[in-house]
Amino acid sequence: MRTIAQPSALHGVQTDMTAAAVLDYDAELMLRVKEGDESSFALLLGKHRAPVIHFLYRMVRNHAIAEELAQEVFLRVYRSRATYEPTAKFTTWLFRITTHMALNWLRDGKNEKMQARPDDETGEARAHEAPDKRPSVEQRLLYQVKLDEVRRAVSSLPGKQRAAVLMHKYEEMEYSQIAKVLGCSESAVKSLLFRAYETLRARLAHMV
Amino acid sequence: MRCPIETHEGAGLLLDFCTRKLDPDTAAVLDRHMESCAACREFVHGQQAVWEALDGWEAAPVSPDFNRRFFRRVESEERRGRWTGLRPILLRPALAVAAALVVLIAGTLLDQPPPRTETAIEVEQVVTTLEDMDMLRVFTL
């Protein structure tokens, strides 16, 4: 396995940080990766793998596929280190690649088999159990039914709407950032979200 | 105040209101508007329900060997990349040696007299036989 240098070793990296200084810390780390500092890539991977995998998981509804796609996303980021230029926020760039991968996967129809056979997500229900107050079987079943309804409702959205909702809700991205990720205008994002939430309200409003 | 629900921009305001992203002043204006607007109240109520429902959907944790698998892929790709990078360097002398061998073999083959064909051998045999017969005829005379 690759030896990962300690973060303190980052200080030794000689690189021109002027462009990245005005940007985010992640872009700065990516510039260090460009200079050959692989420990910075390990930091980026550690920080962003969970949001990327969770986003992909909610897009494709299969954990193994989500992780496989995430591996491909980070591999693409790593491959393009030599040509990386911090022209946008790092997460914008990362999620542009991630969304592209997910939408391609959905478009290629690879999801047909998986839609019929999504993950057994009962583990999620178990994750909600507090150790001190265990829910009854009935409560667990009810929770499972609700969760399934949420998943189905989100999956019923067209790819771009789904991606917009997931970035807005779970990644808490601003409209401007979602617009950059999806390559459209801010008003187009608002329109996408409006239509998506309209569908979700119609399907899920009765749940609360 | 114009009802925000009438435009997508305004609906964006209502979404921000639900997620508490609005500044206090704008939120207060919206609050006052909703006291008299049933449509906006319904929108916000429905949106909050969606928000709560989505909150319940937690993703499974990341596999513990995710990083290990990733770096293994990077290493294997780099190994392949090194080979791909070295291939032209290694292939260039090999091609030169192969070309020299081809020239050497061709030269050797061209330098040798052409092998006699079967027809030539047959003609030669007939000529020899006729000469022998002529000689015998001379002796018998």
Image (tube, rainbow, N blue to C red):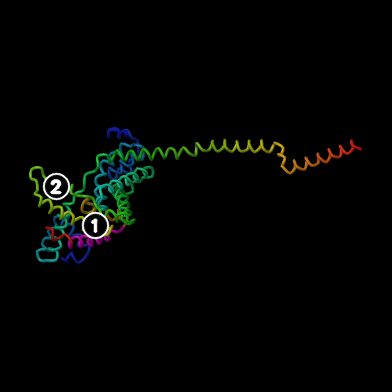
Q: Image check: A96 left or right of A204? A: right
Question: Is-magenta flag for residue A188?
Answer: yes
Q: Which mark is residue A56?
A: none
Amino acid type, label 2: His
SS class, disc 1: helix
Q: Which residue is mark 2?
A: A128
Asked whether the residues under the numbered discs 2 and 1 touch, taking CB atoms below 8 Å apart as contact, a structural biologist would say no
In the image, are marks 2 and 1 on the same chain?
Answer: yes
The magenta region covers A184-202
Task: Point out the tag, 2 or 1, that comes first from the N-terminus.
Answer: 2
Tell me which residue sits at (10%, 66%) in the image.
B36
**Screen quadrant of the C terminus of chain B:** top right
Vertical order, A57 against B36 (above or below): above
* Residue at numbered disc 1: A155
Query: In the rendering, at what x and y percent does residue B117 appear?
Result: 72, 42
Q: Is residue A139 magenta?
A: no
Which element type, helix, strand or loop, lies under badge 2? Answer: loop
Q: Name the quadrant of the N terminus of chain B.
A: bottom left
Magenta stretch: dominant secondary structure: helix
Look at label 1 and name its amino acid. Ser
Quadrant in which residue B13 is drawn: bottom left
Please report the residue visible at 46 percent of the width from the left and 37 percent of the height from the top. Answer: B86
Chain of the residue under label 1: A
> Residue B78, how many percent across, how many down?
39, 39
Answer with the quarter of the image where residue B82 lies.
top left
Q: Would you say residue A180 is visible in this rendering?
A: no
Q: Residue at x 27, y 59 (%)?
A: A158
